[in-house]
Amino acid sequence: MRPRSIIHLNIADFAACLETMTSAALKDSPVVIAPLGAPRAVVYDMNEPAFREGIRKRMPLSLVLSRHRRIRVLPPHFNRYVQAMKEITKQGLAFTPAVESGMGDGHLFLDITGTARLYGPGPDVAFRLKKSIKKQMGLDPVWSLATNKLVAKAATRLVKPLGEYIVGPGEEADFLTAFPLKLLPGISRHEAQTAARFNLETVCHLRRLTPAQLAIPFADRAYVIHRIIQGIDTNPVRPGPAPNRTSDLMVDHEFATDTNDQDELKACIALLSGQISRDLARSRAYPRDLSICLSYADGIRHHGRCTRIRGDTLFMFRQIWGLFARTWKRRIRIRHIGLACSTVPVRTNQSFLPIQADLFRASDRDPKKDKMRMVQRAAVQVSERFGPGAITLGAALRMPGESAVP
C-alpha cells in the first residue's frame, strides 16, 4: 500500500497576525489578543514578542497586565478569523479535495496522496501553497510533510514560528524519540503533567513502559497513548463541505454588553434562527447540519453541533435553542454567538423554502404540520416583499434593538 502524504500548515499566532497586519508598528511590539472589560478574561492569542516575554494562551489577563503594564491588548474578532480560514482552505482546494481546516485557528491539513503526477512532489506542493498564502494574504505559515496527521502536526510544532520539516515513511518513531510530551499532539496537558510526576518528560521515557504499565497512570487511555508515542495515526483528513455540493450559511451576533440573561439569549437565538431560515429560503437549499459557537467574556469558546435540522423557522428555533442549552455549560457571561449551517443546494423554481416530502399520503399526514408549512411559506413571502424585519418570532422582540449580521 502506498504511504499517505499529509501536509500540515500552521500559521503561528494566527489571531495576533491578523490583528496586527494593519499596523507595522505592532508587529515588533508585544501584543496580546484578549477580551476587554471582562473581569476574568484570559489570553486568547499573542504574537512572538509577547511569547518571548513569557505570556501564554489562557493566562489570566489580569496577571499579564500586572507584569507587563505597557503591553498592548487588542480585542478578538472571531468572524475575521473564520473568514481568513475559509480563504486559506480555498487555496488548499486547488491541490486536493481532502482539506481539513480548523475553526479560525490557523491550522490546515491536506492529503495529497496520489497527486504527484498532477502537482509534483509533496514538498513542492507545500512550498507553492505557502508562497500563495504569503503573497495573497500576507501570512507566513510553517509546513511539514509526513505520513499521518499526528507526526505532521508534531513537526510543525518543532519548527515554529518559521521553517519546514519533512518526515519520510518509516521515520515516524525515530522522529518522535526525543519529543517532549507536553508538545506532542494527542497528549493532553493533564496527561503530560501525570507523566512528569514520574519523571517521564519525553517520548523515549514513556516508551520504556509496556501497555500494562501505561494503564496504571492512564487507565483506558493507555492503548491510545501507546500508539501515539510510536507515531501511529490512522485518522483520515476529514474535508469540509465541497464547494460544488454544499455551502455554508453563517450568522452571528455580538452583544453590546456581555450577558447571561436567559430571556435575552433566547431572543438572540430566535433572531439568528429567523435569519438562517430566510437565508435558506433565499438560496433554495436544504439544511444539512448546524453548528453553534459560544464565546464567553473571558475568551473561552464552546462548540456544539446538530444534525437533525429543518428549514422552517419554528422547528429550527426549537432545535437551535436545545443545542444552545446543551452547549452552554458555564456561568460566565456570553459575548458572542455564531451559527453556521451547512447546506445542500436544490434546483427549484419554487418561491418558498423547499420542504422534504412526507412518507405517507396526504390523508394520513398530521394537519398541524400542514398548517405549519403554510405559515412558513407565508412568512417567507412576507419577508421577501416587505423586508426581513417585517415578520419575526415573538421571542426575538426581547432583543434590545440589535440585529443579526449575516
Image (cartoon, grey):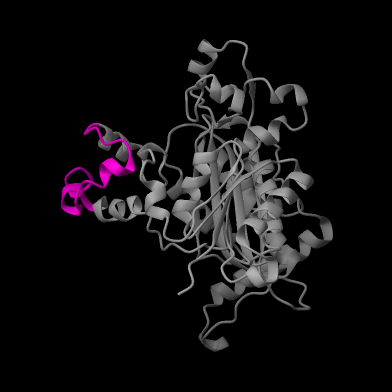
**Quarter of the figure with residue 346:** bottom right
- Give the percent coordinates (x, y) of residue 148: 47, 59
Picture residue at 63% right of the left edge, 36% below the top? 15
Give the magenta part as a residue range.
Answer: 197-220
Q: Is residue 158 magenta?
A: no
- Of residue 1 and residue 336, the one placed in the foreground of this image is 1
Count of numbered circles on the image = 0
Q: Quadrant of residue 96?
A: bottom right
Residue at (30%, 40%) from the top-left corner? 191
For this view, does 79 lie left or right of residue 62? right
Q: Residue at x 51, y 58 (%)?
A: 319
Left/right placement of residue 311 relative to residue 386 reads left
Q: State the image coordinates of residue 119 (x, y, percent, origin top left).
A: 69, 66
For this view, does 305 lie left or right of residue 9?
A: left
Work out whether residue 289 or residue 87 is closer to the camera in this orientation and state it. 87
Residue 317 vs residue 387: left or right? left
Instruction: Residue at 44%, 53% (x, y): give it.
Output: 150
Measured along the vertical axis of the image, is residue 212 above or below residue 30?
A: below
Where is 200 relative to 285, above or below? above
User: Magenta stretch: residue 217 in it?
Assistant: yes
Considering only vertical position in the picture, is 124 above or below 283? above
Is residue 284 at least partly visible in the picture?
yes
Report x, y in % for residue 43.
53, 27
Vertical order, 268 against 315 (above or below):
above
Q: Please name whichever residue, 199 or 279, is drawn nearer the observer in this view of the structure.
A: 199
Q: Position of residue 65 (x, y in %)?
A: 54, 14
Q: Quadrant of the N terminus?
A: bottom left
* Residue 186 is at least partly visible in this image: no
Which residue is outermost to the right? 385
